[in-house]
Amino acid sequence: QKEVEQNSGPLSVPEGAIASLNCTYSDRVSQSFFWYRQYSGKSPELIMSIYSNGDKEDGRFTAQLNKASQYVSLLIRDSQPSDSATYLCAVNGGGGTSYGKLTFGQGTILTVHP
Amino acid sequence: SAVISQKPSRDICQRGTSLTIQCQVDSQVTMMFWYRQQPGQSLTLIATANQGSEATYESGFVIDKFPISRPNLTFSTLTVSNMSPEDSSIYLCSAGEYGETQYFGPGTRLLVL
């Protein structure tokens, strides 16, 4: 059973702080990793994708991947109340019949308070 | 990125009936997927919709309950058959290429009475 684990939270941070979201996965051959944001009543929207070890930055968002530790994280700098949402970590199956399929974590609820 | 639309956006249905949900992508894509999201839960993959062949279902989901069509590279349907209140959920369509980002439609909110 391929698993993706996230802290469900809720994670509460003050406006302007750094929010750190973490995710671990069990399938060692996974190749691609995604962070989605989901507002209440809306569908998931892509925030970041990352494919190789290290950091990837896009504006206020930084994704970090460590395949040896099977760990992926998302940092949100200068957090804004509009960042309050559920953040879903998704991992693409590494091979065989799993390739192309996403396995989602249970999501972390982030609240940014003014 | 692909733009995905779904119809209907929401519906209220009586138990024992069936509902077909449509998913349209604005460009040709290799892979289309159907997910279910229960209130307060994460996404659960129902099946992969394969163009020109039968869908591939995940454990716990069967073709008789969730028949899927994929007549071309931009369109798919999911039917929820013989519905019961337990089928009340949000059904999401996604699309993408192998190993690449999946983009999601807006979802269909289904309530079964």
Image: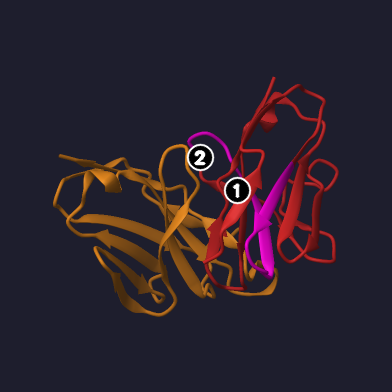
**Residue A106: image tag:** none
Considering only vertical position in the picture, is A9 above or below A46? above
Assess disc 1: are there few (<14), some (14-19) or many (≥20) residues with their C-alpha within 10 Å of its C-alpha: some
Residue B33 drawn in magenta: yes
For the point 68% across and 69% down, the residue is B28
> In screen coordinates, is A3 left or right of B51?
left
Callout count: 2
**Residue A59 image point, x, y percent:** 26, 67
**Residue B65 image point, x, y percent:** 81, 40
Q: Could you say which quadrant of the image residue A93 lies in?
A: bottom right
Badge 1 marks a residue whose secondary structure is: strand
Residue type highlighted by circle 2: Gln
- Say which chain tag 1 marks: B
Colour used to depict chain A in the structure image: orange
Per the picture, the main secondary structure of the magenta-coloured stretch is strand
Residue at mark 2 shares a chain with residue at mark 1: yes
Which residue was labeled with disc 2?
B41
- Say which chain tag 2 marks: B
Residue type highlighted by circle 1: Thr
Which residue was labeled with disc 1?
B44
Considering only vertical position in the picture, is A14 above or below A100? above
For the point 62% across and 69% down, the residue is A100
The residue lying toward the viewer, choosing from B4 and B91, is B4
Badge 2 marks a residue whose secondary structure is: loop
CB within 8 Å, label 2 to label 1: yes
Colour used to depict chain B in the structure image: red
Considering only vertical position in the picture, is A31 above or below B111? below
Q: Quadrant of the N terminus of chain A?
A: bottom right
